[in-house]
Amino acid sequence: MSAPITVSAAAITHPGCKRTMNEDSYIAARPFFLVADGMGGHAAGDLASAAVVQEFATVAGTTASTVDEVRAAVARARTRVDALSDGPRPAGTTLTGVCVSEVGGAGYWLVLNIGDSRTYRYADGVLQQLTVDHSAVQELLSAGAVAQAAHVSKNVITRAIGAGSTGDPDVWMIPAEPGDRMLVCSDGLNNEVEDADIAQLLAAHPDPADAASALVDLAVENGGRDNVTVIVVDALAVVATDDDTAPRTHSEVDEDTLPRAALV
Ligand code: MN
């Protein structure tokens, strides 16, 4: 079976300027492109994020992933993270990213999120955040409590793998289009770099490795107050359906009649 989405990807992580340790981890191995940000102030943040990506590494190398596979990997990861520590501030980590997936043979992005790391799509010149932060700030903003949100620490997250959370991942299935550029990052990027600047750098650097390195460089230049991890994943070609197994390229895309996104 050929991959439902043919991708080109690059990943970079950097400790930033203020921290000696890097508690972020990532996997950029088909079909998984995921970032985990180990929680600072908790025990073993680095071990927690590493344990989670290791669980995905053991099942990497396939052409496509499934929602069941992802949920099972998250469950195994949670067991490992829970076993790392049992103090008052138990180990925890975020997890977000995209997995190559398919529906009826057509290429889909499986997007998942737990915590406040982010997955964006950049397509047709528009940057869109696909994930919803599991953070106190976002919950207040979603409830319309804008004034209160301004007074809440950005660091308070409301869902994690570990850290006493039983939270399940949000999972979305999104039809892929040739030319899609997915950006997966830890908050060390989006807390330092405005969305408009992220979009500008993604537009300016067609090569994913160049784009990833330009984003990390700007986060560091803007202060680098946290670890920063960036994965850029480009869809070079996308299989449309089982009947049409010739992957489409960017010039061949029809107006999409598939549902834009579904939370599953
Ligand atoms: Mn962080």
Image (tube, rainbow, N blue to C red):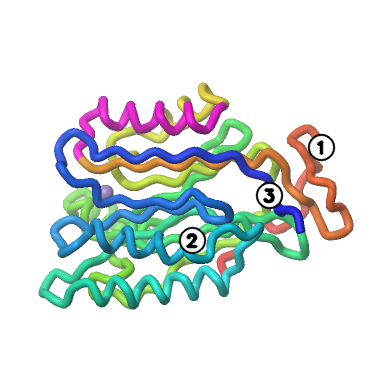
Q: Nearer the viewer, mark 2 or mark 3?
A: 3
Outermost residue, right direction?
243
In magenta segment, residue 210:
yes
Numbered tag placed on residue 5 in the rendering: 3
Numbered label tally: 3
Give the CA distance from mark 2 to mark 3. 17 Å
Residue 134: quarter of image: bottom left
Q: Residues within 10 Å of mark 1 (few under 14, many from 20)?
A: few
**Magenta residues (range):** 207-225
Does 104 sit above or below residue 191? Answer: below
Q: Residues within 10 Å of mark 2 (few under 14, many from 20)?
A: many
Give the CA distance from mark 1 to mark 2. 28 Å
Whether residue 136 is visible to the viewer of this picture, yes or no, is yes
Where the N terminus falls, by quadrant?
bottom right
- Residue that carries the numbered disc 1 in the rendered image: 252
Outermost residue, left direction?
88
- Residue that carries the numbered disc 2 in the rendered image: 112
Which amino acid, by three-letter code, is at mark 3?
Ile
Whether residue 147 is visible to the viewer of this picture, yes or no, is no
Does 124 sit above or below residue 175? Answer: above
Looking at marks 3 and 1 on the same chain, the residue that comes earlier in the sequence is marked by 3
Q: Residue at horizontal 22%, vertical 42%?
A: 226
Q: Nearer the viewer, mark 3 or mark 1?
A: 3
Q: In this image, 64 relative to 224: left or right? A: right
Looking at marks 1 and 2 on the same chain, the residue that comes earlier in the sequence is marked by 2
Q: In this image, 6 relative to 183: left or right? A: right
Q: Position of residue 130 (x, y in %)?
A: 50, 51
Which amino acid, by three-letter code, is at mark 2?
Leu
The secondary structure that dominates the magenta segment is: helix
Does 198 sit above or below residue 99? Answer: above
Per the image, label 2 sits on a secondary structure element best described as strand
Task: Respond yes or no on whether mark 3 lies under 8 Å from ligand 1.
Answer: no
